[in-house]
Image (cartoon, rainbow, N blue to C red):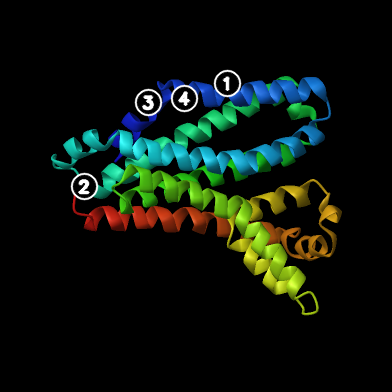
Amino acid sequence: MLKILKYSFYDLIRSRWSYVYLLFYLALGFVLLFLNNDLSKAVITLMNVIIILVPLIGTIFGVMYYYNSKEFTELLLAQPIKRSSIFIGQYLGVALSLSMSLVIGLGLPFAMYGLFQSSAIWEFSLLLITGTFLTLIFTALAFNIALYNENKIKGFSYAILLWLFMAVIYDGLFLMSLIMFESYPLDKFSIGVTLFNPIDLSRILILLKLDISALLGYTGAVFQKFFGTNLGVILSCIALSIWVFLPTFNIYRKSKKKDF
């Protein structure tokens, strides 16, 4: 599996799209810090970009890499290599290369602008951690979609619909349910629904660490009471880890049973 991971990783590192992805974050970081030297405000702006863009890029790259490397994958399947090792290695190669582009692309501008001497270092670190989690999660979901759909058009369509549902539609349904049942106690419901969406969970973690949960109103007070504690942060990280583990395990399971 490590050899497949290394090949996929180096293959993507040499791809021009990886450089475009890296340069985009480099440019974004420098522009934000040039316009505003306040690192905390820059982190808030970056959060809005990363929460939406990282899942989208992870989903598209995952599906695209699976379909584009299909012939090479079939060649590997003819070799005495475990199927699960091939697909898990490819998934990790894609996810880690995207995560590295994210960390380096944003880390360099902030480090040059004095991040390590700033109080915003913990918020920025949390931003990168949640961005890495989202990359791992949505790349794994993309591989699952591709494994279940041999047709490229269907695969890309389902992948975009998944991202759209998680990033936009889910929040709309959540807000509608809060309005419809506002007369009922919804504390536990709000927390439970948030745990079922990694994008919402990542956004709330960053907002709470930036001490701007008041913008969320009553719901923000509920989230602050739960996610603002050390136990809440630990449980959130566990929830994000489960979001990584379950799709990855399904890649392992599906690849062993799939008829290629």
From the viewer's side, name the closer residue of 58 and 119.
58
From the viewer's side, name the closer residue of 135 and 100.
135
Q: Which mark is residue 23?
A: 1
Q: Quadrant of the N terminus?
A: top left
- Give the amino acid at mark 1: Leu
| SS for callout 1 | helix
Looking at the picture, how far across and down is residue 161, in whole percent? Answer: 50, 51
Please tell me which of labels 4 and 1 falls first in the chain.
Answer: 4
Q: Is residue 30 left or right of residue 242?
A: right
Q: Residues within 10 Å of mark 1 (few under 14, many from 20)?
A: some
Placement of 183 over or under 160, stated as above or below? below
Q: Residues within 10 Å of mark 2 (few under 14, many from 20)?
A: few
Quote the CA–CA distance across marks 3 and 2: 21 Å
Answer whether labels 3 and 1 touch (C-beta < 8 Å).
no
Q: Which mark is residue 17?
A: 4
Quote the CA–CA distance across marks 1 and 2: 36 Å
Quote the CA–CA distance across marks 4 and 2: 29 Å
Q: Residues within 10 Å of mark 4 (few under 14, many from 20)?
A: few
